[in-house]
């Protein structure tokens, strides 16, 4: 049986759901190995999460109704049922919806644990109130595979559905015929898990870059796609470099050449004098904020490329492996601790955490505003901020120089609560499991390997 992780996926799931709640639902695409039509994430994990979220929302609304903070007319609006103003299970669907191929015995075993998982979610500090205010209908998964037959003229408009659909689309085929697909214009081989680590294949292309050039990239085909990506990434890098931002050359592994690393900086580019701000093809991908203040803690999480531009911070902790030129009045207000992902070094974060927390303590004692940055601003810097927050702040987010930390036995649940707090503000956070293990090992006085 697949057990959902009540951990870093909590804030990420809730944040992403906030985006699609207002649009009526979402589509999730995945694939799996030979012989299976749907991966376990679609057959069990996501359906479990929808059920857990639905129950947590129902519990929250019932509490608000009992306390008089939620008016009956608001309840009726939430449930889209004006005939009954009480929150009942048959109005707000909290049942577990699994596909037919999941055995009844396994479904029963999952249902026995739903209440426990709901309690864990509620105890994590997740902002159920915010989710409840956005979600007008309960969540429900739907499954679509290559063998699914849909009559489009019989599909009602999503406004007529009595639930918020999470459409789970599997790109896999149950037979091996499509494993090496050659019937279309382009051929491909399916490699399980190949899409998990985008740093190994994306060549510096970000989601924003992709969607800004999606038609050009797709129409270019396999032979020209890599060159097109290199052109887009390098144009953006040169643009940012001319604006004084941190923009190191992007290197990628080249499997077709003997050289281990290929530099995309040799792409033919327009002259710098021709790079005007009104040229949208050369604009950087700043569609969303890349620095986030963590409440009133004086902690900021961000990207290294924006560190030099931050004028409203007093000190900077750079966790990127590359140094960055920063002008601060006090030379001791900048600390560079080169760190890499746990996939490259399982102890990189763990070994640098004592120095990072000590640097934070010295500056936060002076009420200094501290920026913690890494290249992406999503993983290492978030984990460092989590360690600082847990070590030096109480559970209300108030700096106490580590007093509450010395009196508290840090459990995984407590660390999850702190992580949820961080991710409420750092909405692009994507802390990796390996780095979180190192943080937990540091907080508990253990080792990164045993966490």
Image (spheres, rainbow, N blue to C red):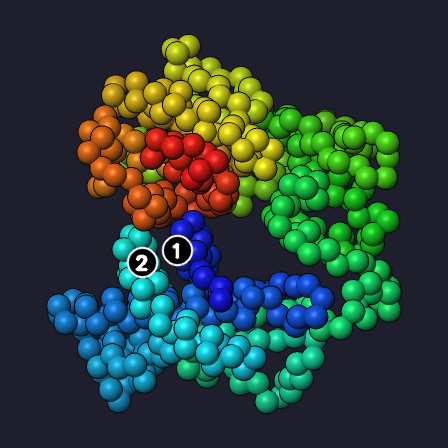
Q: Which residue is mark 2?
A: 120
Q: Earlier in the sequence, mark 1 or mark 2?
A: 1
Where residue 6 is drawn, which disc sits there? 1
Q: Is residue 326 left or right of residue 283?
A: left
Observer able to see residue 60: yes
Q: Position of residue 391 (x, y in %)?
A: 30, 31
Q: Residues within 10 Å of mark 1 (few under 14, many from 20)?
A: some
| Residues marked 1 and 2 touching at CB (< 8 Å) | yes
Vertical placement of residue 36 versus 417, above or below = below
Q: Please give the name of the residue rendered at 38% of the width and 74% of the height, measured from the top-left corner.
A: 111
Element under disc 1? loop
Vertical placement of residue 151 versus 391, above or below = below
Q: Please give the name of the residue rendered at 38% of the width and 78% of the height, measured from the top-left corner.
A: 95
Q: Residues within 10 Å of mark 2 (few under 14, many from 20)?
A: some
Q: Position of residue 68 (x, y in %)?
A: 13, 70
Q: Nearer the viewer, residue 125 or 186?
A: 125
Image quadrant containing the C terminus: top left
Q: Please give the name of the residue rendered at 45% of the width and 29% of the height, measured from the top-left corner.
A: 350
Q: Is residue 251 left or right of residue 87?
A: right
Q: Position of residue 43 (x, y in %)?
A: 54, 71
């Amino acid at each position: 049986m697949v057990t959902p992780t009540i951990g870093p996926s909590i804030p990420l799931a809730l944040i992403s759901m906030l985006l699609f709640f207002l649009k009526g639902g979402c589509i999730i695409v995945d694939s799996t190995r030979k012989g299976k039509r749907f991966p376990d994430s679609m057959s069990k994990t996501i359906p479990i999460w929808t059920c857990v979220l639905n129950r947590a929302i129902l519990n929250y609304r019932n509490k608000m109704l009992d306390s008089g903070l939620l008016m009956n007319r608001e309840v009726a609006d939430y449930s889209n049922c004006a005939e009954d103003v009480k929150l009942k299970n048959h109005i707000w669907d909290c049942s577990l919806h699994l596909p037919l191929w999941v055995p009844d015995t396994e479904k029963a075993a999952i249902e026995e644990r739903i209440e426990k998982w709901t309690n864990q979610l509620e105890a994590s500090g997740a902002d159920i109130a915010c989710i409840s205010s956005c979600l007008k209908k309960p969540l429900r998964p739907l499954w679509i595979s290559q063998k699914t037959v849909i009559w489009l003229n019989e599909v009602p408009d999503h406004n007529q559905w009595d639930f918020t659909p999470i459409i789970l689309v599997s790109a896999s085929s149950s037979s091996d015929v499509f494993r090496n697909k050659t019937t279309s214009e382009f051929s491909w081989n399916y490699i399980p898990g190949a899409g998990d680590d985008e740093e190994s294949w994306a060549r510096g292309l970000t989601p924003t870059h992709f969607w800004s050039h999606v038609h050009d990239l797709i129409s270019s085909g396999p032979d020209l796609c890599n060159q097109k990506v290199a052109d887009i990434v390098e144009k953006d890098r040169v643009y940012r470099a001319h604006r004084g931002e941190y923009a190191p050359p992007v290197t990628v592994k080249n499997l077709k050449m003997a050289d281990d690393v290929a530099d995309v900086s040799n792409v033919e580019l327009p002259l710098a004098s021709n790079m005007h701000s009104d040229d949208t093809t050369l604009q950087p991908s700043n569609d969303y904020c890349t620095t986030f203040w963590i409440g009133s803690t004086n902690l900021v999480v961000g990207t290294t490329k924006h560190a030099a531009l931050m004028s409203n911070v007093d000190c900077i902790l750079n966790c990127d492996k590359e140094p960055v030129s920063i002008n601060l009045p006090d030379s001791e207000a900048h600390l560079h601790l080169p760190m890499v992902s746990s996939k490259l070094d399982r102890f990189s974060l763990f070994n640098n955490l004592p120095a990072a927390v000590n640097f934070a303590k010295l500056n936060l004692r002076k009420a200094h505003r501290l920026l913690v940055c890494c290249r992406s601003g999503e993983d290492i810097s978030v984990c460092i901020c989590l360690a600082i927050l847990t070590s030096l702040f109480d559970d209300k987010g108030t700096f106490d120089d580590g007093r509450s930390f010395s009196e508290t036995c840090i459990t995984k649940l407590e660390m999850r609560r702190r992580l949820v707090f961080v991710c409420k503000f750092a909405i692009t956070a994507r802390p990796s499991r390996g780095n979180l293990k190192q943080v937990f090992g540091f907080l508990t006085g253990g080792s990164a390997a045993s966490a």
